[in-house]
Every structure is written in structure tokens, then in C-alpha cells.
Image (spheres, rainbow, N blue to C red):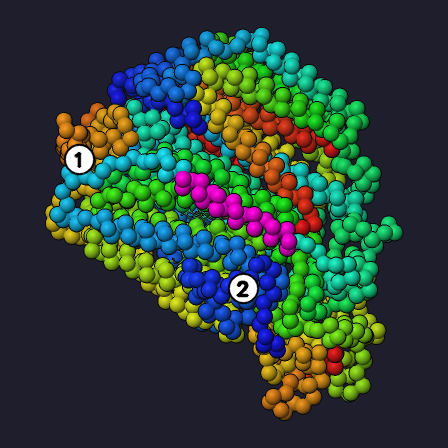
Amino acid sequence: MAEQTADVAAAHGHAHDDDHGHHPTERHYWIIFAILAVLTAVEVAWSYLGLEGVSLWLPLLVMMVAKFILVAGEFMHLRFDTKIINGRVFTWAFAASLLLAVAVYFIVFAAFDTVFA
Amino acid sequence: MSTTKTRKRSFMPRTFVSRALPVAGAALVLSACADDKPLNTFEPRGPRAQSLYDLMFDSGTWYVMGIVFVLVTFGGIFVAIKNRVDPATYDPEDLPVQTHGNITLEVAWTILPAVVLAIISVFVVRTIFELEEPNEPGELDVMVIGQQWWWEYRYDVDGDGFFTDGNGDGVVDEADQELPLEIALDPDDVVTATEMVIPAGEQVDLILTSRDVIHSFWIPRLNGKRDTVPGRWHTWSLEADEPGKYTGWCTEYCGLSHARMRMSVIALDDAEFDAWLANQQQQAEVPSDPEAAAGREIFANQCVSCHVIDDGEFEYPENFAETVPLVSHAAPNLTHFATRSTYAGGIFGSYAGPGTDPDDDALDASVYNQLSELSQNPDSPDDYRWNTAELKRWVANAPGQKAMASDVNPDTGLGRGMLPFPQLTDEELDQVVAYLATLD
Amino acid sequence: MAMMEEPLALPSGTVARSRPLGAFSRPRETSGLVTWLTTVDHKKIGIMYGAAALFFLIIGGIAALMIRVQLAVPDSEFLSAEFYNQVFTMHGTVMVFLVVMPIGAAFANYLMPLQVGARDVAFPRINAFSFWVFFFGGLMLNTSWFLGGGADGGWFNYAPNNGIAFSPSNGIDFWNIGLFIAGIGSLTGSVNLITTVLNMRAPGMSLMKTPVFTWMTLVTQFLLLLAIPVLTVAQILLASDRLFGANFFNVEQGADPLLWQHLFWIFGHPEVYLMILPAFGIVSEIIPTFSRKPIFGYPFMVFSGIAIGFMGWGVWAHHMFVSGIGPLSVAAFTVATMFIAVPTGVKILNWLATMWGGKIILNTAMLFSIALVIQFTVGGLSGVSHAMAAHDTQQTDTYYIVAHFHYVLFGGAFFGFIGGMYFWWPKAFGYMLSERIGKLQFWLMVIGFNLTFGPMHILGLQGMPRRMQTYSDAHGFNFWNMAATIGSFILGFSTLMILLNAFVSYRKWVAADRPNVGADPWDARTLEWSIQSPAPDHNFDHDPVVTSLDDFWHRKYQKDENGVLRRVATGDELAQPGNGEGVHLPAPSYWPIVLAGSIPIIGYGVIYSLWLVIPGAVLMMASIYGWALEPADDLDIDDHHDDHAKELETVS
Amino acid sequence: MTDIADSATDVVDDVASADDHAPADHGHDDHGGHHTSLGLSNMKLAMWLFLGSECLLFGALISTFLLSKARFITELVAGNPRVIESIPAGLAEEFIEAGTVEPIYDIPFTSGSSFILLMSSLTMVLAHKAVSEDDDLQTKIWLGATALLGSTFMAGQVYEFTVFYREGIEYGTSLYGSAFYTLTGFHGAHVTGGILMLLSLLVLAFRGKLKSNRAETVELVGLYWHFVDIVWVLIFTIVYLIP
Ligand code: HEA
Ligand code: HEA
Ligand code: CUA
Ligand SMILES: [Cu+2]
């Protein structure tokens, strides 16, 4: 125990060394941001095209998901989950909750569709 | 009432022996105690209830439950007793074989229940969809509206649907159903409360909603229940094999007097039903008898702010008439009050006499239509009599008889419950009740 | 890193420098009330969860008895309709949220860190906070009895009946806000416990070597983590409607009341599984110990638990079979629900198989466990019959449902908990409970329980609706209602016997000069038995190193040269001596309780007057800073701060 | 789950960031040869769990919003007088004509504020990078920028609320108003909480106490911040762009 206590401070540094190896460069972040910005712009433009139905919302949703994945994967480092710590625990914890939420609320909507029971 | 309790069976008939198989102990107890239970789900009296009953027996569900129950219970007890050791003399080194598991077993008892359940679910799903099958065109549809704490029924007699063109677009369509109830409802329809009268042997389709909170409509011997949800229209159906009285109970908790929100279905044979319906379509008569006429006067002063009696003469408060032309809004429509054997959420009987306990199912359907005529002789104990005393208590102090919120909305002048009328003298109460008795 | 509690890293006693808000500076007491109020020790917190649950059990139990007295005879006027509605609502609410859930938390808190060989949970102070915020939330809920009446909407409180128009008194606000506050505790608790299980196991203890109870705790806490926010949203919507005039459930404005039902039951069904899984974990420890065999099919026990937790998310609408969700949804949810019987059945059968061929010691803990297996099955089977949606239209909202859920909750969860108390009592308190009283309690309880709730199956199928203040003679419900009422008094008495037993056994133990029960009185299997009883403050003198499932047992029993299992050492010989020298423990703190205490003030403020929110919020901010600044060594100060800012997010 | 299950364990003490010094792995090599312990930071794990729970929270809020909006529009178009009266007459006409609530939105404006929030995610991640490299100046700059961008977003939010309010969408009168303000208000509250955390970090930074040994704190705040941003990505598309 005592030995671990002593290690605490060292551990911090250690962990970061590790992070360093995998973390992307500043440039990389800027590029990601640029993509996000472009996606947003396309989204907005798309919504002005006057489309309706699937051709409106499907691309919008796809772009939304893309942005989601970019932020979670790059900015929140989930893409490096495997490398930083083995097992992708964070990805699992988050993705499982997220999928659960999507599935559950999707079912709710499905159930609401039948107004006339 | 009809005493022949024949069952209509939709599946393969069961032999007596297999029915009597004591696999599910509980099921036996249930059917053994089945007498005198007006709400008993094990006494189906209509095809819908019957198919629910059959689902549990014919598709073997109760038996599967019974077998699993016996296996686990007696298996558990048996193993515990057989393998027990006396802790006082037990030698801890005397270990049993240290088995860790057995894949074959695990797979077996994963798959076996799954298969059993899969088979059962086929029956269930089939029944679920069967329950939704609508009746033939031309058969009766009734709208059921729940409110705290009584039921209103509307019969689409003229066949033009339940709704009016509320939004004025020239057609009665689904959009009209989205409108608030009192705007959307068709005023032509027959409106009653508490007791739903239906023709026996015919599937009656219900369309259910609520004016306030969620209630649930349930006549156990005719069908399961379905919630009435404000802002939504649900469908359900009833069918009684035989004429008779079938009681039910609101089964979704709906506030203070939920326990006093009961109802019943009176199934009549075709001719009687037609007679009943024809009568309901009549306007009420303005009474000539002086006592009743005095009662009508009081009613005009005190009661029309909430109740409707359609005799073509009453003047309703202005805002009332605007939104709800001759349709009861917050209170039961009393136009044919004296044709109902129970009132106030089915907890009081309007008549005394044989089989008129509101919670009992003994009322003979054949006398139902004539209750008000049979009640002419007030002294005979075997006869039907207008239950004056109870009605007087009700009119004098309804909230004292049945817990309810009795406030009046200052904006609309409409109440949520019935007000007490301490100002009415005993004589006036007699007059009001005499008037109510004429509403047949 | 620094934001978490650092129980082992903190040199205790060097807390000197900055002392914000001196009144609540680091407590130094070593005994007495203050140690309990300020403790961050998971064992003490576990015991407090248990004690609080027993306290609320009395409230919920008295309510239950009032229900039964009212229903003993037809047309009874013992309780008015108004009061009856409050009583059954509060009974259900208190029992579910303030009795069964916290008893589960009690076991999880006390045992799980011991079972994984940890010295405390991941965040000890947050742990204390979780308890206090639960406790204060529960108290706040119950103050409604004195402030205009309890909630009267039923425990699932359907909209729009829960709206201000239909329930104008404050009861439902208390229900809403009280449970909201208690929910904060559940949420922080779940994050804490999951982190502990995942991250703080003893060296060598891979997840597939952790005890089943720990596994069930993990699943339970995941259910909480993900289910609580859904209830929270429902409560936010309701509070917005009731207190701020929003329209989420205002049908006049076009709202759909089924939204509440979906949200409530998306939470509510995982909720019922998270009430039973801890009990499943408990009996999974007891049955092998007293069958003297390892648990049969360990991986299947684990995965079926996970499967139950997972499938529990896909079945909520089975509570809405008659709500009008349409035949397609009904059919889908029917099938989904039925298949939950599969993993649950796997568990039942594995317990039976564990007993099969065992050498069974039928002591009280074991009896309760066996009773759980049997009685839960009864409840499970009626559950499957509810799942048959078509027929559920006959069953729902009748006493048949009431029978179902008391069989699974009382006959299942509660029996498991009481078995667990008998089993772990010596570990927690250092003395054994009397077996004589225990067995008497067991038999009374089995009789009382089945007499109370068995008849409800019959009543329900005979058509007796639930939540009925009264019924009439003509319905023919008299006999079985009377039977149930008699049963409930036997049941109530037998429930209280656990307290009686604790008291009597304690006196005996004291009279006998406190004999040492030893580390391992049951010759048990898991790590908590490898330390002294009662468990020392620091749990483990050194980290246990684990090489297999039931590691402790395998250190006691090893094969000799002939391949025969021999006892090579007793538990007491192997047990750690309980020498905590050199171990640094997390220091106690006032801040968790103060911070937790500030929240109900805000709660009352929201209900009564927004002015009251201000002192509440001030106290809250102050305690966050106090908390942040407390371990006065610089390394720590600021990070704590962030930590709590974040926690507040959940709060707000 | 299986990954977790397979990874042998470790972390003996609870000091979370003891990432690597955890007793390495204890065997188990069923899954593609990841020999690991769960050497995670407790705090980071806790944060991810918390964010998982937030998914359910925002999922419910977004669903509530969508449902309420749909009901509102349906009733409005059907001509329910109570719903029509719940918003000003002019607005009601516009809504009915469009069949959506689209006309009330100012998409260019909201796109701007969405962009700002996205941008703040960039600055956040740069702040984290700076702090792990002990670059004090950049740390301060980027933290400050993030807080500033967040505040700008909030200002936009407040502005939007006032515009809506002036147009006549009130919290208490219409179903749509309740749903809209609650959803966006909840998100706003989360942003505000994030800003408070950022400011705390900034104070630390100025007191010279935010060094690379604290990088994880910054990272945690960052995780939270990015998550809140992600939620806005969803809200922007689902609430604003898709009618
Ligand atoms: C601890 C809590 C708990 C547990 C574990 C369960 C377990 C189950 N519950 Fe229960 N339930 C409640 C608590 C619980 N329930 C509560 C509180 C309510 C009421 C809420 C309210 O309205 O107030 C309720 C209500 C409820 C309903 C709604 C009824 C209604 O209102 O109409 C339904 C419907 O499907 C249901 C189903 C089930 C099923 C299928 C299981 C299954 O998990 C059971 C599985 C177990 C077994 C089946 C036994 C063992 C299995 C075998 C031995 C294998 C072989 C078996 C077969 C082949 C069948 N429950
Ligand atoms: C875990 C949960 C749990 C537990 C343990 C219990 C325990 C009991 N419950 Fe139940 N119950 C629910 C959960 C639970 N209940 C829920 C969720 C509902 C639904 C509510 C709703 O519809 O909204 C419900 C509803 C419910 C009803 C239906 C009410 C109605 O629908 O109208 C009934 C009726 O008999 C009942 C009875 C009992 C009884 C007799 C006990 C007994 O087991 C209690 C025995 C224990 C004690 C009695 C405690 C000991 C205390 C004393 C003996 C007090 C004496 C002390 C002094 C006087 C100082 N409960
Ligand atoms: Cu109406 Cu219950
Ligand atoms: Cu359920």
C-alpha cells in the first residue's frame, strides 16, 4: 500500500507520457474542426434546399451522426481508447448507454405511432 | 336472470377429465369458489372473455405454470430435506462432490423454457389480434367516456358517426377527433350514464376516451379491460352470449372516488334492446303531476347548470349551450334517468326490489325495461319500488354519499362533482325525486 | 487523480492549514454520533443504509397494515377514501424507494468492497453523500404526512391524475421532489460502485473470478445508472407542470398522457429488476456455502444476471398492455417479456442444481434462501401469466398483480435480504444471531407471507381491483380478504423479529463476555470472510491476491496426493489478523452530509417559496467549496472543486 | 462487456490515474491478444459512466420535445381552439400554413451559435493539449477562449429565448413552449455548469497550479464539455433543421 501511495505523483506523469504517444497533433484537431464546420454548413444549406421527407432528414441525420462520431472519437479521444488503455472500456460504457438510449426512445416513438389502438 | 351458464367455446373442446386435472392447484381453487362473484374472470359470459379464458387453459399456460411450480417447489423442498446434514455432527471435511456445472444441462434448461414460451406466445399473439377484430358494419357502436367518477355512453343511433364537423371544414374526419370533446361530439346521439345497455349475442364495438384522467373500462365476464385516456381514442368491444346484467369496475386509479366508479352492462334480447333504444331517443316529458312539476321547477333552478334533461323546454346557461348543446358536460344526462337501475358510478340502486343490489349481477334482464312500470306498487316487497330515500340523500348531499371534489370552475360555471343542496327542504327533495321518477 | 477521494494517499491527521467554515472542519471524533454523521467508511455507510431502510420499513409496514385493516371487511370505514389513497401510494413508494432499494444498497456498500478485496469504494466521500442525500430525500417525502397529506397518485403516479388540477395538495410535489433527491443519491452511488467493481478489485481477481454477489451489484448499479435519469426527466416534466405551469401532461393543450407511462416504466421495469438482483446475488453466496459446493454454473449465473439486466430494458410496456398502445406493440412486448423467464429460470435451476448432491446445512440463512427460490418462482410464474398480454387485460390492476409483485418483492427480494442479514450479521457486528429465533421467524414469515399474498391471486382472478378503498359484500371478496389481513399481522410481527433477534442475541453475547465469532463462522467462500469479524475499519491488512473464484475457500481446502479434498487450514488460521498499522484511511468529513442537507432545503423552497431556495443554494455552494478545500494539502484543493461542479450538473 | 470481462484486473488502490503502474496483466488472452489490466483512471471511468447516464437523460428530453411538438402541430392543424389560443394569432396562422413550427426559428442565427459551440470544443481540446505539455500561456488562452465561446453561446441562447418570448411563445401557455424551453434550457444549464468549471480551471491556471499533473482534470472537464457540445449537435439537427 505504502508503495502505491508514494507512486501517486509519479503515476500522473506516467499516464501522460502514455497519452502523448498517441494523441494527435494540434493540426489534426484543427482539421477535425474544419470538417465539423463544413458539415455544419452543409447541414444548414441542405435544410434550405426545400427538400421534404427522406431526402431532407436522412442526409441531415447522417451528417449529425458523423459530427457526433467526430467529436466523440477525436476530441473525446475515444478513437484512442484502445491505445491509451486496453479494452475500450470507455467506448463500451458510452456506446452501450447511447445505443440503449437510442433503441429505447425509438421504441417509444414506434409505440406512439398507433394512436388508434 | 338467465341461469343457463353455457359456454361458447372457440377452441377445441376439452374433455371433462383434462379440465379437472389438478395440475394447477390455484386454478382449481379459483373455479371451485366461482359462485356469487359478479366480477369473476373465470366465468366468461361472452366470446371475448371466453377466448381469454381459453387462452390460459387451452394453450396450456396454467398447466405449464403448474408444472414448473410443482417442480421447483417440491424439487427444492425435496433436495433440501434429502441432502440436509446435521450441523452439530457434520464433519467439514466430508465434502460432497464439487461439481462446477454442466454445459449440457445449462443449454437444456435455457432452450427448453424458451421453446415452451415460444409456443405459448404464438397463442397469445393470435389472441391479441383477435381481440382487435371489429364488428360487422351495421352493428352497434358505443362511445364510452370516463370521468371522475362515472361513465357516460353515447350510442351512434343514426349511424352518422360520433363526431360533428367541429372545425367547420365541411367533413367529419380525423381532425375533428382531435378537437376537445365537447366541441367534437355529435349532439344527435343518445346519451346515458353508468349502465350500458347492449343487445345480447352481438359484438358491440366501443370507442373509449376520457374527459379528465385515465380510467379503465372493465366488464370481466365479457372482456378484459381497456384504458380510457384523455386526448386519445381507444377501441374495445363487448359481447354477451345471454341477456343479463354484467357488472364492472373502473380499474385504473383515477383519484379520490376511484373505488366508487363502477358500472354495468345490461344485455337485452334484440326486441327489448330495440324498444329500449327507441325509448331513449324520445325526449323527456314535461310532467303534469303537480309534485313532479314542482320538482321540475326546482331542477330548472338548481340543476341545469350541470345536468341535461332533454325535454325541449329547459333553458340552459348561455355558455353551457354554446359549447355543449344539450349534451351533458360535467354531469350525467338525466333525460331517461328512471330507466337506469343504478346511478352515481353504479354504487346506488334507483330501485329497490329483487336483484337490485348495484354490485350484484342478479337483476333479471327481462324486467329491466319495465323497472319503472313495475315500480308502481310501492308496498309490495317483491315488487320494484323507486328508491326514494336513497335518492333524496343523494340530491341533498351528494358529496356526503360519495367522496368527490365538488367545486365549480368560475370560468365556465361548470362543476367537477355534484354540489350539496342543503337549501332544499325535505318537501322539495321529495318533489325533485318525484320529478326524477318521471324520467323514463 | 486528485479529484477522487484518495483514501490511501492521504496522510491522515495532517490536516491543519486552511479551515474554511471552521464549524465543519475535519471531524476528529473517534466514537459517538459524529463518527456516524461524518463517516466515509463504506461499512458504516452500508449499515446506515440498512438502518434507514428498517426505519422506513416501519412506516411502509404500518401503512400496509392500515390497508389490510381497511380491507378486512366489506364497506369498511376505517380509512376515508382520501386517506386510503395516500396510504397505499405512500406504502408502495416507501417500500420500493426507501426500503428495498436501500437494503440493496446496504448490502452492496457493505459487502462489495470486501468481496473484491478493496479498502473502500472508489469515492468514499461521494459514497457518504449518496447515502445522506437518499436519506434526506426519503425523510422529505415522509414529511408530507404532516404537511397536508401524502401523495395520492399511486406509486406510478400516472398523468394527468398527478397534475395540479386533479391533485392540488402538495403530496405529489413531495413525492416528486423527494424521490428526485433520493435519485441523486442513487445516481452518484451507482457511478461510485460501478467504478469500484471495475477498477478496484484485488490483484488477480478478474471479473470472472468475482463473486456472484459482486456481479449482481454491478448489473444492479448499471441499471440504476441508466434508469434513474429517465425517471428524473419524468419528474422534471411533472415538476414543471405542477410548479411552473408547463403543459407536458396538459391534455387540453394537446399533450399525450401516455408519455408519462412510457417514461415511468422505462425506468420502472429496470427498477424492479434492480430490486431483485441484489437478493439473487445474496442467495448465490448463501446457497453454495451451506450446500458445501461451488455455485453450479458460475458463468451462467453471471451471464443470466447480465441478460436479465439487459432484457429488462425491452419490456417496459408490459405495464401498459391496456393503455392503448396498439396490438403490434402489445404483441412485441408480450414476446419480449416472456423471454425474461429464460435467464431467470437459468438462475433458479442453477440454485437447485447447487443444492443437488450437496450437504445442506439448513440454518436460518439457508432456509430464507430456499424460500426465496420457491416463492420467487411463484411470483415469476404469475409474472409470465401477466406477460400474456391478451389475458393481462383481465389481470391488470387487480389483486392478481398485487400478488405477483409481493411474491417477487417480498417473497423474493425481502426473503433474500433477511437471509443475507442472518448470513453476514456476524461479519458486520461480531456476534451471531440466534438460530432459534431465526427459525421461528422463518416459519412465521413463510406462513404469514403466503397467507397474506397467496389469497390475493384468488381475489384478483375473481375480479377484485387493486387500489380500492372498499368493496361491497355482493362482490364475494370477504373471505380471502380476511385471510390476507390475518396473514399480514403474522407477517408484520415476523418481520419485526429481525430486530428482536438482533437485540436478544446482542444481550446474550454481551452477557457471555463477547466471545469472538471468528473470521469465518460459516466456513464460507469469499474474501470478506478472510478478515476479522466485525470487519476492521481498514478491511484488509494487505491486499489479498486472488488466483481463482472462491479463492478463500481454495486456500482452506486443497487436494491431497490422492486427489481428495482436505481441509488444510481453517478460515481463522488463514484470516488476516486485522492489524491496520500503516494503513491510511480516508478521513471523515462533514461536507457530504452538509451538502446533502442543503438539497432538501432547495426542495422545500421549490414547493413552498422560491425564497427558501436562496439559503439552500448558498449552503450548497458553501459546502461544495468546503468539500473542495477540505483536505488542506494544496495538491488537492482545486480538483475537488471541479469534481463537485460536475456532480452538480446531475443535481441541477 | 466481454472486453472488460476478459481483461485481467488490477488497480489495487483507488488512485485512479495510476494507469500504468497497476500490476500488469494476469493472463487471460481469449480476445485477440489484449493483455491488459483495467488500468483506468477512476475519475475518467466515473465521468464516462456519468455521460452514459446523461445519454438517457437527454434522450428522454429530446423525445419529449419531439413528441410534444408533434402533438402540438397536429392539434393546431386540426383546429383545436385551445391550442390555437395558446400562441398569438399571427404565429398560429403561420404555423398552420407551414404545418411546422419552422417559421419561428432563425436558422442563420442558430447556425452561428452552433458553430460557436463547436469551436469551443476545438479550443477545449487545445487547452487539454496545452496543459499536458505544461504550456501555461496556451493553457490560459484556450481555457479562456472556451469559456468565452461557451458564454457567447449562452448569450445567444438567452437572446433566442427573449425573441421567442416576444413573439409570444410562453413557457406556460403552449405545449410547444414548455417543450422547447425545457429542452434547450436543460442544455443551457449544462453549458452553464461547464462554464463554471472552466472558470475554476482558469483561476487555477492563473494561480499557477494547473500543470501537466493536472491534465486529467482538464481532460475530464473537456469530456463533459464535448458531450454537451454533442448534445447540441443533436438538438441543432433534430430540433432546428428537421421540421
Ligand atoms: C422484484 C421485482 C419484480 C420481478 C423480479 C418481476 C419479474 C417479472 N415480472 Fe413483474 N412486476 C413487479 C415486480 C417484479 N416483477 C411489480 C412491482 C409490478 C407491478 C407494478 C405496479 O403495477 O404497481 C409488476 C408487474 C408486472 C407486469 C404488469 C402487470 C400489469 O400491471 O398488468 C408484468 C406483465 O408482464 C410482469 C411480468 C413479469 C415477468 C415476466 C417477470 C419475470 O422476470 C419472472 C421470471 C421468473 C420466472 C418465470 C420463474 C422462474 C423460471 C423458471 C423456473 C423457468 C421455467 C419457467 C417457464 C417455462 C415459464 N410484472
Ligand atoms: C418491496 C415492496 C413492498 C413490500 C415489502 C410490501 C409489503 C406489504 N404490502 Fe405492499 N405494495 C407494494 C410494495 C410492497 N409491499 C407496492 C409497490 C404496492 C403498490 C402501491 C400502489 O398501488 O401504488 C403495494 C400495494 C399493496 C396493497 C394493495 C393496495 C391497493 O391496491 O389498494 C396491499 C394490500 O393488501 C399491500 C399489502 C402489503 C402488506 C400486508 C405487506 C407486508 O409484507 C408488510 C409487512 C411488514 C410490516 C408490517 C413491517 C413491520 C412493522 C410493523 C409490524 C408495524 C408495527 C409497529 C408499530 C405499531 C410501532 N401492498
Ligand atoms: Cu375511474 Cu378509476
Ligand atoms: Cu415490469
Task: Say left or right for C582 vs D191.
Answer: left
Say which of C444 and D135 sits in front. C444
* Chain of the residue that carries numbered disc 1 in the rendered image: C
Under circle 1, the secondary element is helix
Expressed as whole percent of the image width and height from the top left, the position of residue C186 reads 44, 39
Please tell me whether residue B201 is drawn above or below residue C179 in the rendered image: below
Which residue corresponds to mark 2? B41
Task: Say left or right for D238 vs A97.
Answer: right
Expressed as whole percent of the image width and height from the top left, the position of residue D119 reads 62, 18
Expressed as whole percent of the image width and height from the top left, the position of residue A2 reads 25, 20
Q: Is residue C416 magenta?
A: no
Please tell me whether residue C5 is drawn above or below residue B87 in the rendered image: above
C-alpha gap between disc 2 and disc 1: 57 Å
Q: What's under tag 1, amino acid-wise? A: Gly
The magenta segment is: B108-131
Which residue corresponds to mark 1? C571
Q: Residue at x 58, y 58 (%)?
A: B11
Q: Which part of the image, by quadrant, shows the N terminus of chain B?
A: bottom right
Q: What's under tag 2, amino acid-wise? A: Thr
Packing grade of label 2 (10 A; few <14, some 14-19, many >=20) is many
Residue D109 appears in which quarter of the rendering?
Answer: top right
Residue B431 appears in which quarter of the rendering?
Answer: bottom right
Q: Residue at x 65, y 85 (%)?
A: B385
Task: Say left or right for C526 vs B408.
Answer: left
Packing grade of label 1 (10 A; few <14, some 14-19, many >=20) is many
User: From this viewpoint, is residue C239 visible?
Assistant: no
Expressed as whole percent of the image width and height from the top left, the position of residue C441 reads 27, 57
